[in-house]
Amino acid sequence: MKIEPKPQQLDRKLLYFPIVHTPADMGKLGDAVKSLYLRKMGRTAWNRKIDLVNKFWDQVAEIISNVQIEETTTRVYQDGLPVTNNGKEFEIIKKLADSGSRNHLLVVGLVERGAILMGTESIDLLMAEYDITKKHLENQSSGKPGMGKKIRESEDDILKKRDQFIASRINQTLGEGELGIIFLGMLHDIKPWLSEDIEVVFPVLIEAGRRPS
């Protein structure tokens, strides 16, 4: 009699929440993004965008409120949060939450309920992307042709490296039987580099984002 192999057990779970960024999430770049959007689309379109973003975060907040958090076995990973050598991760999150970021307010709430906040990203890659994004915004604001394609290729390369680092970080730190919660921008795709024993769940499904042309 032929014995069929048992299906692989997925004993680690990751709740994957996409991020719709607000100016508060973008720090120093937030004002530049808002100014560029207002100039291109107008005040009415901006207000409509902010209203839709707030409704999205209301939905995420409701879902998060119903997630059962187990102390020592629930880990939170956050887009843009570097791995630090001095345990400053929560201080970074709290500062952004205090500035009005809906995303970071939810992370603070999860930590207060007992979840473990994890440094998620490489500081070197984040700084490299910051410089590229700044150049991208400056290029769009000036309207100078010729550099857009080169900047876009650099953005794509850094984004891929960030995705690989984030996935590796989760693979190494999310323990057997543990629940991970990650908040990650819609342009990211970490699934190809996640371990096969991690079950990925998408509680909110929205259309993938696109960079402005």
Image (spheres, helix red, strand yellow):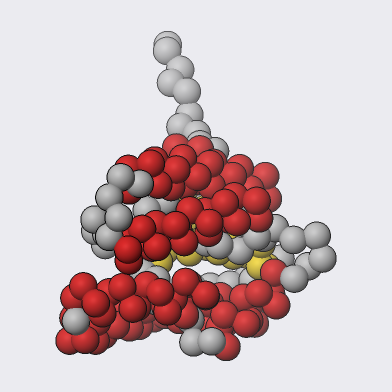
The image shows residue 151 at horizontal and vertical percentages of 40, 47
Residue at 57% across, 51% down: 128
Residue 154 shows in the view: yes
Splitting the image into 4 quarters, where does residue 38 fall?
bottom left
Q: Residue furthest top?
A: 1
The image shows residue 146 at horizontal and vertical percentages of 30, 45
Q: In the depicted view, which residue is nearer to us: 78 or 136?
A: 136
Residue 66 shows in the view: no
The image shows residue 71 at horizontal and vertical percentages of 68, 71
Vertical order, 153 against 119 (above or below): above
Q: In the depicted view, which residue is nearer to us: 10 or 182?
A: 182
Q: Residue furthest right?
A: 86
In the picture, the quarter occupied by the N terminus is top left
The image shows residue 110 at horizontal and vertical percentages of 58, 77
Vertical order, 36 against 84 (above or below): below
Splitting the image into 4 quarters, where does residue 186 fall?
bottom left
Q: In the depicted view, which residue is nearer to us: 154 or 160?
A: 154
Residue at 37% across, 53% down: 187
- In this rendering, would 73 be left or right of 193? right
Residue at 35% across, 78% down: 34
Vertical order, 93 against 150 (above or below): below
In the picture, the quarter occupied by the C terminus is bottom left
